[in-house]
Amino acid sequence: MRLLASGIVLGLLFLSGCKGKGNRLSAGDSLSFSVDTAEIKAMDSMALQQRRTDSELVKKANARPGYNVGLERAELRTPAGWRRTDTLIGNIRAALLDTASERLRFRTSVSLVSDSLHQLSLDKYVRGAIGGFVQYVPRFSLIGQGRRVIGGRSSRWLHYSQDADGTDLENICYFIPDSGMVYILTCSALKGRLLQSRPAFESVIGSFTVRRGSAPPPRR
């Protein structure tokens, strides 16, 4: 069940590149503003509720030692022109690096989460993750898989395509073991355009390191 749960979490992360963006103004559009005291009070109330919800999610994330362990020690370089967001997806902590795209509902991205290996070998963990993808990721199609050394660690990778709410994506997911846990680094792009973003992806992968000790890594 934990392996299937890992597959669900990963599927959610791969979908995280698809954003529901707000409307944008085109040339000639204009804005008009009005003050509505009741509306402002309602917005303040919603903001307060969101802060409470965020606080509850943080507590839940901290209560899940299988996931989230060690993520604060991982370091990634943010490519030029990209942005980094440290966030929660459900109760899973994630570091998301992304950049603007020509598609309003998609941003080319790299995500990083961590999980316990649950005393499994890396190969068995990856096989369980593939089973989770097959079951939970829409139109999952495995293109290839292999091994690669990342940050001095013998790691595994999966190359696959998927459908994300009507958008065809292509991903490479790296599983990087470290002291009984695994860092899961996923590079996501529009299908057929993965190679165009390879320089940025490679700069992130090449920068991956794990700091020893409990101090959080410096922000970049």
Image (tube, helix red, strand yellow):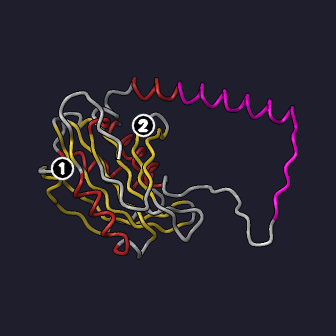
Considering the numbered disc 1 on the image, is that residue within a helix, a strand or a loop? Answer: helix
At 35% from the left edge and 42% from the top edge, which residue is drawn? 219
Q: Around disc 2, counting alpha carbons within 10 Å, would you say few (fewer than 14), some (14 to 19), or many (20 or more)?
A: many
Say which quarter of the image contains residue 68: top left
Direction from residue 15 to residue 33 in the image, left or right: right
Give the answer, above or below, for where 218 lies relative to 17. Answer: above
Residue receiving disc 2: 92
Q: Quadrant of the N terminus?
A: top left
Q: Please state which of residues 218 and 56 is positioned toward the viewer in this rendering.
A: 218
Q: Position of residue 192 (x, y in %)?
A: 41, 76
Q: Position of residue 45 (x, y in %)?
A: 73, 28
Instruction: Say which mark, if any, is on residue 84.
Output: none
Q: Please state which of residues 100 and 167 is positioned toward the viewer in this rendering.
A: 100
Say which quarter of the image contains residue 141: bottom left
Considering the numbered disc 2 on the image, is that residue within a helix, a strand or a loop? Answer: strand
Residue receiving disc 1: 123
The CA span between labels 2 and 1 is 23 Å
On whether residue 31 falls in the magenta region, the answer is yes
At 27% from the left edge and 63% from the top edge, which residue is drawn? 202
On whether residue 210 falls in the magenta region, the answer is no
Does the CB distance between marks 2 and 1 fall below 8 Å?
no
Residue type highlighted by circle 1: Asp
Q: Position of residue 194 (x, y in %)?
A: 37, 71
Sequence order check: which comes first, mark 2 or mark 1?
Answer: 2
Residue type highlighted by circle 2: Ile
At 71% from the left edge and 32% from the top edge, which residue is drawn? 46
The magenta stretch spans which residues? 30-55
Direction from residue 149 to residue 196 in the image, left or right: right
Direction from residue 177 to residue 93 in the image, left or right: right
